[in-house]
Image: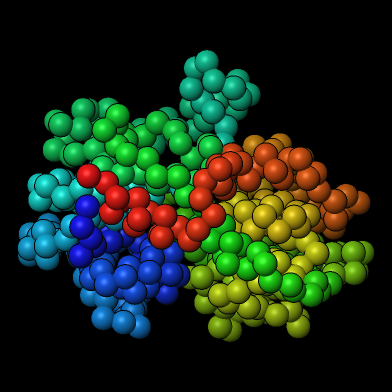
């Protein structure tokens, strides 16, 4: 397949981190023209897109707001050979349906990226997982049930006017799971989860360890993605940061490690630096470097936790009593703790939580985590987008 133009369709504000992770630089270096279609306002109208970011090269970024924009920009999309569909990882929802129909009407093949995976609690009959947890999940879903969403999730793709994906990219073994947009005709590409990319680039380098504990920030309680969670009333900032400061103080006093904040890519702590405690560094854009040099990682549900597993760093996993009850939290954080053999710490108990095993980890559990959620054994040891582009080009 000849690739001269590629469209990248996103459903979150396109920024520097997205530029890096979507392979734009790799594509342009290979002579492929890239156009980005930012559909945030269509898929998530409540999300503030913020100040538009301009890529450092000639990559065009179109920001779409409604169906008129879809029609207006259809000729631009139609000129592309392939669509990298990042408005979904495989699900069809009322929010992304207009975008999927838009691509289908133009007859363009699209590629899904389903390379990221985390442990979760199964809630389907016959599958493993706590029966009580599955029941709780079903009860918590009841207030959010929508006839429109239910029909969209169940009607055949042909009736919805949506074509299945031409390609799907997987990472670890557990990333390969049933999805609406993945059919027998969908071709599989095995690569790895995004955080493996930085690990792959740095693996042969020698780095001096530092007596630090890295906090993987998720921009809680300010991250606007949580405004998309139905019924969620928010996280109490005083409780959250008060608990973090107590935990950080204990890590520094009892474990002898200086806490460093690896800021979330969308975080802005200008004027809020004091929230983490006096004198603690807040570092942006260097999570991989910080984790690699550290002796401990503090995390909740950040996908960047994979870096701690890859670099064989002990983990403290935390939550709060107002965050944990959300299905999108407990359904993941409980099996993460089980998979890695860690105890969950609630920040409300930070003053008394047992930290005696905080600096240990189970190597066999870490190995299993890599295989399931980061990189399948035997998949290529090459950059993600090199694997993807070469595979697509080689297709008949």
Nearest the eye: 135 or 383: 383
The residue drawn where x is 52% and y is 77% is: 268
The residue drawn where x is 76% and y is 40% is: 364
Q: Is residue 292 above or below residue 346?
A: below
Q: Does the image show residue 305?
A: no
Q: Please provide percent x and percent y for residue 244.
A: 73, 63
* Residue, far top: 126
Q: Please provide percent x and percent y for residue 280.
A: 74, 79
The residue drawn where x is 78% and y is 55% is: 314
Nearest the eye: 382 or 19: 382
> What is the basis of the colouring in this image?
rainbow
Q: Please provide percent x and percent y for residue 328.
A: 52, 43
Q: Is residue 321 above or below residue 49?
A: above
Q: Is residue 185 above or below residue 98?
A: above
**Numbered circles on residues, count:** 0
Q: Is residue 363 left or right of residue 253?
A: left
Q: Quadrant of residue 142?
A: top left
Q: Quadrant of residue 144?
A: top left
Q: Please provide percent x and percent y for residue 230.
A: 41, 46
Q: Is residue 115 left or right of residue 351?
A: left
Nearest the eye: 99 or 142: 99
Image quadrant containing the C terminus: top left
The residue drawn where x is 50% and y is 58% is: 382
Q: Does the image show residue 255?
A: yes
């Amino acid at each position: 397949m000849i690739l001269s133009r590629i469209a990248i369709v996103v459903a979150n504000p396109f920024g520097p981190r997205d530029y890096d992770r979507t392979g734009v630089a790799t594509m342009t270096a290979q002579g492929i023209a890239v156009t980005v279609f930012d559909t945030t306002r269509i898929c998530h109208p409540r999300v503030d897109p913020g100040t538009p970011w301009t890529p450092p090269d000639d990559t065009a970024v179109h920001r779409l707001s409604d169906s008129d924009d879809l029609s207006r920009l259809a000729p631009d999309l139609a000129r592309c050979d392939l669509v990298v569909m990042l408005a979904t990882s495989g699900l069809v929802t009322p929010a992304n349906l207009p975008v999927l129909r838009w691509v289908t009407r133009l007859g363009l093949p699209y590629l899904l990226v389903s390379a990221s995976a985390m442990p979760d609690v199964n809630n389907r009959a016959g599958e493993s997982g706590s029966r009580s947890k599955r029941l709780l999940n079903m009860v918590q879903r009841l207030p959010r049930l929508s006839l429109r969403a239910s029909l969209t999730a169940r009607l055949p793709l042909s009736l919805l006017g949506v074509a299945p994906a031409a390609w799907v990219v997987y990472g670890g073994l557990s990333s390969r799971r049933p999805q609406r947009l993945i059919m027998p005709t969908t071709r599989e590409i095995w690569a790895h989860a995004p955080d493996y990319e930085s690990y792959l680039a740095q693996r042969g380098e020698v780095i001096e360890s530092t007596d630090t504990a890295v906090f993987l920030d998720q921009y809680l309680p300010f991250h606007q993605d949580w405004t998309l969670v139905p019924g969620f009333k928010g996280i109490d900032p005083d409780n959250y940061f008060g608990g973090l400061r107590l935990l950080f103080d204990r890590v520094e006093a009892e474990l002898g490690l200086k806490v460093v904040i690896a800021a979330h890519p969308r975080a802005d702590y200008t004027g809020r630096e004091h929230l983490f405690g006096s004198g603690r560094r807040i570092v942006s854009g260097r999570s991989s470097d910080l984790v690699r040099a550290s002796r401990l990682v503090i995390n909740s549900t950040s996908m960047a936790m994979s870096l701690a597993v890859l670099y064989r760093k002990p983990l403290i996993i935390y939550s709060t009593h107002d965050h944990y009850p959300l299905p999108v939290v407990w359904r993941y954080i409980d099996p993460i703790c089980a998979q890695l053999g860690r105890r969950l710490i609630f920040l409300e108990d930070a003053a008394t939580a047992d930290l005696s095993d905080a600096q240990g980890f189970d190597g066999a559990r870490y190995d299993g985590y890599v295989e399931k959620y980061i990189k399948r054994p035997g998949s290529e040891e090459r950059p993600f987008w090199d694997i993807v582009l070469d595979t697509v080009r080689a297709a008949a």
